[in-house]
Image (tube, rainbow, N blue to C red):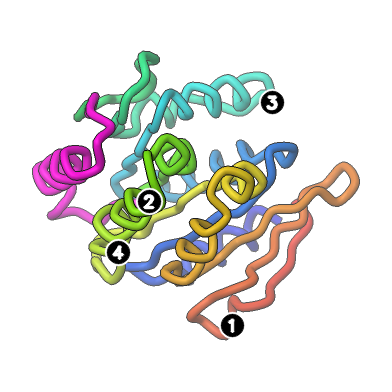
Amino acid sequence: MIEMLERILDNLKWGETVLVEHSTYTPTSKLFHLTLNWAKERGYLILIDDILDTLNVYKQHMKIAGLETKVLDESKVIKIRGIQKTGNIVGYISRSDIPVLNKRYQEIFENYFSRERVINCVLGYEKLLITSGSKEEVLHNLINQVMPFIGFEKRIAFYYIPTNVLEKAFPEALPLIESVSTTIIKLDKAGKNILFSIVKSIDNELDGIEIRI
């Protein structure tokens, strides 16, 4: 199973934006842990966008599940608001107004990550959208935070989104994220297992794959 998931990750293309859809009752720490270790083994730089302390929640879930968390401590982190100091924080953004946030993020990313291949895991993005003041701000964030990196050939991004939270708060946002994502992975509960499904992919060989984790 692990080897199959690693082969799937190997087949992703540089420049992709991967949306990992899950519900709040579907554990995601195992896939997150596997993705980080896959990136580390292949010598890729790991960047985690930690929005409102979501990374610390993942770390505690990993600890409770008996998963090694050293890879988190070694990973570079751009922290957007919050107070928990998890990972190797290389930039902190305290402002939540979208134009300032996006400008500061671009500055940090270009300073640290524009020259190396980077696996970028984004945690808590739904919180950023939910705390936006209007639908216009949500659209502005998607246009300026997500879309500029699509096709950037030194980055593969993974956005972990609890869909039931986002659909309740901003039902229009999820279809917009789905439309710009090149690959969509869906995680569903299947008894005691998790059903890993690729429901959208630019690669025909990946599209439609299902695995029980």
Kindly report the distance in space between the C-alpha atoms of the residues bearing marks 4 and 3: 34 Å
Q: Residues within 10 Å of mark 4 (few under 14, many from 20)?
A: some
> Is 183 covered by the magenta stretch?
no
Image point 77% across, 56% down: which residue? 195
Who is closer to the viewer here, 190 or 119? 190
Mark closest to the chain's N terminus, 4 or 3: 3
- The image quadrant of residue 103 is top left
Q: Is residue 24 above or below residue 95?
A: below
User: Residue 55 appears at what percent x and percent y?
Assistant: 46, 28
Q: Which residue position holds label 3?
A: 65
The label nearer to you, 1 versus 4, is: 4
Kindly report the distance in space between the C-alpha atoms of the residues bearing marks 3 and 2: 34 Å
Residue type, numbered disc 4: Met
Kindly report the distance in space between the C-alpha atoms of the residues bearing marks 1 and 4: 25 Å
- Residue 34 visible in the displayed image: no
The outermost residue toward the right is 191
Residue 205: mark? 1
Residue type, numbered disc 3: Ala
Q: Which residue position holds label 4?
A: 147
Residue 86: mark? none
Mark closest to the chain's N terminus, 3 or 2: 3
* Residue stretch in magenta: 93-119
Kindly report the distance in space between the C-alpha atoms of the residues bearing marks 4 and 2: 13 Å
Mark 3 in CB contact with mark 2 (< 8 angstroms): no
